[in-house]
Image (cartoon, helix red, strand yellow):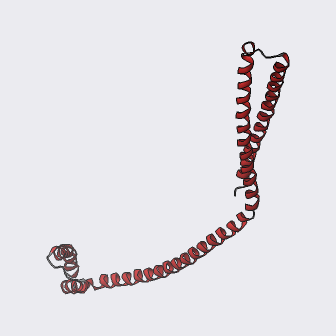
């Protein structure tokens, strides 16, 4: 007869639990246990088993929380060490970079001088080209001006000198242009 009562209890227990859960105010854990045990005192073993499992899980949770706390503390320490290492790296890197700065400043000075020299040569070339144009215009009108052979020779010599100056100025400009480019590359190569 006890087994029949137990079977009926097992069949009715889920309905009882469902009706308690769907009721407006479901009972708390202790009240629920009391009601179930009031209906089926033999269910005490399962409740004790549940309580034992809850304590076991709580114990695991405490162990887990302790481990997580230790890990979080270790992470915080490692983050501090990382930040300190980063700060040290930046300071040391900046100190190292300063060692090359005098060389870069010297190259930048040479670059400014080369650019300035190039601009001066460019102005000289403009003056030379202007003079060549004027002499060529003058020699183009030689019949109208009735220049003597000696005057004509003087203007031709002057034109030849200007053409040579033009050639030398262009060569100087090419050399300065190469210097400017090489100095820029050297500065770029020294950047760290």
**Left or right: 171 with respect to 36?**
right
Percent x, y of residue 123? 70, 38
Q: Is residue 12 above or below residue 47?
A: above
Percent x, y of residue 16? 17, 76
Q: Tell me the residue at 76%/33% (across/down).
A: 170
Percent x, y of residue 69? 49, 80
Q: Tell me the residue at 36%/82% (across/down).
A: 54
Percent x, y of residue 31? 21, 86
Q: Tell me the residue at 74%/49% (across/down).
A: 113
Residue sticking out furthest to the top: 143
Q: Is residue 155 above or below residue 191?
A: above
**Between residues 176 and 89, which one lies in front from this camera angle?**
176
Residue sticking out furthest to the left: 24
Q: Tell me the residue at 51%/77% (across/down).
A: 72
Q: Quadrant of residue 48?
A: bottom left
How many numbered marks appear? 0
**Between residues 78 and 6, which one lies in front from this camera angle?**
78
- Location of the C terminus by quadrant is bottom right
Q: Is residue 20 above or below residue 99?
A: below
**Between residues 137 and 86, which one lies in front from this camera angle?**
137
- Location of the N terminus by quadrant is bottom left
Q: Is residue 173 above or below residue 187?
A: above
**Left or right: 145 with respect to 37?**
right
**Left or right: 7 with respect to 174?**
left
Q: Quadrant of residue 99?
A: bottom right
């Amino acid at each position: 007869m006890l087994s029949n009562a137990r079977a009926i209890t097992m069949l009715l227990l889920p309905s009882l639990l469902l009706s308690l859960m769907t009721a407006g105010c479901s009972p708390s854990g202790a009240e629920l246990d009391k009601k179930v045990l009031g209906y089926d005192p033999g269910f005490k073993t399962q409740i004790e088993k549940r309580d034992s499992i809850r304590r076991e899980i709580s114990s695991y949770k405490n162990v887990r929380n302790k481990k997580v706390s230790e890990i979080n503390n270790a992470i915080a320490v490692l983050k501090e060490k990382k930040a300190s290492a980063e700060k040290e790296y930046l300071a040391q890197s900046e100190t190292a970079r300063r060692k090359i700065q005098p060389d870069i400043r010297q190259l930048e000075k040479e670059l400014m001088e080369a650019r300035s020299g190039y601009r001066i040569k460019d102005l000289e070339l403009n003056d030379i080209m202007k003079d060549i144009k004027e002499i060529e215009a003058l020699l183009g009108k030689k019949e109208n001006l009735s220049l003597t052979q000696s005057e004509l020779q003087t203007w031709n010599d002057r034109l030849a000198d200007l053409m040579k100056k033009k050639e030398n100025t262009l060569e100087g400009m090419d050399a300065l242009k190469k210097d400017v480019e090489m100095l820029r590359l050297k500065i770029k190569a020294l950047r760290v």
